[in-house]
Amino acid sequence: MRAAEIASGALRRSKAKAARAPPAPAAAKKPASPGGANGAGGDAGAAAPHDSSEVTAAAALAAAAAAAPDSFSGGGARILEGLAASGLRSIRYALELDGVARVDANDLDPAVVETMRSNIEFNGGAAEAKVQTFNDDARLIMLKSHQVYDAIDLDPYGTPAHLLDSAVQAVSEGGLLMVTATDMAVLCGNSGERARPPSSLAASTWAHAAAAPHGCGAPAGSTGAAAEFRVPRSAARARLHGVPRRWVCWTKYGSYPIHRPYCHESAVRILLACIEQHANRYKRYITPILSLSIDFYVRVFVRIHTSAGTVKRSASKLAYVYQSQGCDSWVLQRVGEVDTRGGGVKYTPAHGPAVPQQCPETGARYLMGGPLWAEPIHDQAFVSGLIAKMDAEKDHYAQHARIKGLLTSVTEELPDVPLYYSLHDVCKTVHCTAPKAQIFRSAIINAG
Ligand SMILES: C[S@@+](CC[C@H](N)C(=O)[O-])C[C@H]1O[C@@H](n2cnc3c(N)ncnc32)[C@H](O)[C@@H]1O
């Protein structure tokens, strides 16, 4: 069965089978759902019924779509929702997807698992027959389940980074890993921190220093000692507004983010690169089928395969990004190269440098970000097939227009061109008024 066909089964929402939550909201903890109303990344808030589940079915879409076709078409697929909270999403997987044999719904919090159990019971025998609850650390479950799950869904608060190593080992051959990350400030490189006052300075003095309009850190009325507290203007500003903590992204994801207009796309690509590198440790690699940045989170759907040969190419799928600090221009530099000269295949480090020491346009230095995933982030055939199937079953989707809009914008992306320029920012750089996007697009199309 084609992936898209399986996917449509995932999205279809039969009235008879749709998962429900008890009328009195049970105490599932979910203060901030990672799934916005238009996103594929989260589910309805805790135990309360919520129609964003239509779009979260877009999560289910990928579950069904990308998981190992054999297991799904044979009706024997096994799914793990590692951080299940209310269990609502697991119940939906069990009730609304064809081909699911069993869903393991796990959460670390015992109180949450109790709620999950009552939600499953409330949804009746079909849910009870398929959804098993667990109260454990998702990492332990995954580590003990070598290539067991046809689909794993990880939807943590904040970063999924600590879960990835065990997850890539627990997905079956060709199976699906679905990961949400809500720590966008980290992934986009805009997380700020307020510097603490040095212990030798009184907090009020520090505040004064930071607020000084011309970067002079001298407290009002101070004399000779002022020089000791003098700080550059930018530093004073940083102390007030926070400085980017790009090292956080490095420590969590092994990549440096660059805070530029393309940062949401690069957030997706950093997460993909991180999953790929974890997979590579076990001779496995990823094939992204759908990668989304929505509202305040990213959500990626990747297949996982095993091949020691393919893993050799991994470095050539990742790239560093050199970002000019004086303008918007940036250049990608692949980490590795595949050299096919002379008939054989060699996997080598890439040749550099990709840029001169200084930006030719502005003379500014470059910041080096990444590595990030530089290969396609969607399977376009899958997404197009999914849209066609959804159109054919339009009545089943309360949020059809929204999901279709999201997926259509995916199909309009160039598959092999990572990152992008903002027309507005480019016009600002060259001091001209930005043309209408429609006119600009048609100029590009007419230019071939
Ligand atoms: C954002 S919620 C999950 C929401 C859920 N996927 C949904 O759609 O409703 C995150 C949950 O992860 C649980 N959690 C955090 N760390 C965990 C871990 N290491 N293993 C299992 N569960 C964990 C928390 O107790 C919390 O209930």
Image (tube, rainbow, N blue to C red):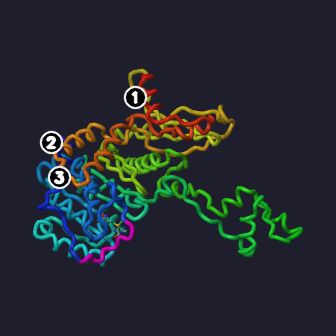
Q: Does the closest atom of ligand 1 sit within 8 Å of the Cβ of label 3?
A: no
- Tell me, for residue 1, which label it has, or none: 2
Q: Is residue 270 above or below residue 51?
A: above
Residue tagged by mark 3? 396
Q: What residue is rendered at 17% in x and 58% in y?
A: 96
The percent position of residue 417, horizontal first and vertical second, equals 43, 35
Main SS, magenta residues: loop
The percent position of residue 368, horizontal first and vertical second, equals 58, 43
Observer-nearest of 431 and 33: 431
Q: Is residue 327 above or below residue 23?
A: above
Q: Is residue 374 above or below residue 213?
A: above
Left or right placement of residue 276 versus residue 55 in this view: right
Single out the mark in the foreground, 2 or 3: 3
> Disc 1 or 2, which lies upstream in sequence?
2
- Tell me, for residue 345, which label it has, or none: 1
Determine whether the residue tagged by mark 3 lies in a helix, strand or loop: helix
Residue 31 magenta? yes
Observer-nearest of 48 and 85: 48
Q: Residues within 10 Å of mark 3 (few under 14, many from 20)?
A: some
The percent position of residue 400, horizontal first and vertical second, equals 25, 50
- Tell me, for residue 403, which label it has, or none: none
Judge whether residue 173 can be spotted in this image.
no
Image quarter in which the N terminus is found? top left
Left or right placement of residue 72 versus residue 246 in this view: left
Single out the mark in the foreground, 3 or 1: 3
Which amino acid is tagged 1? Val
Determine whether the residue tagged by mark 2 lies in a helix, strand or loop: loop
Magenta segment boundaries in residue numbering: 24-32
Q: What residue is rendered at 35% in x and 55% in y?
A: 179
Single out the mark in the foreground, 1 or 2: 2
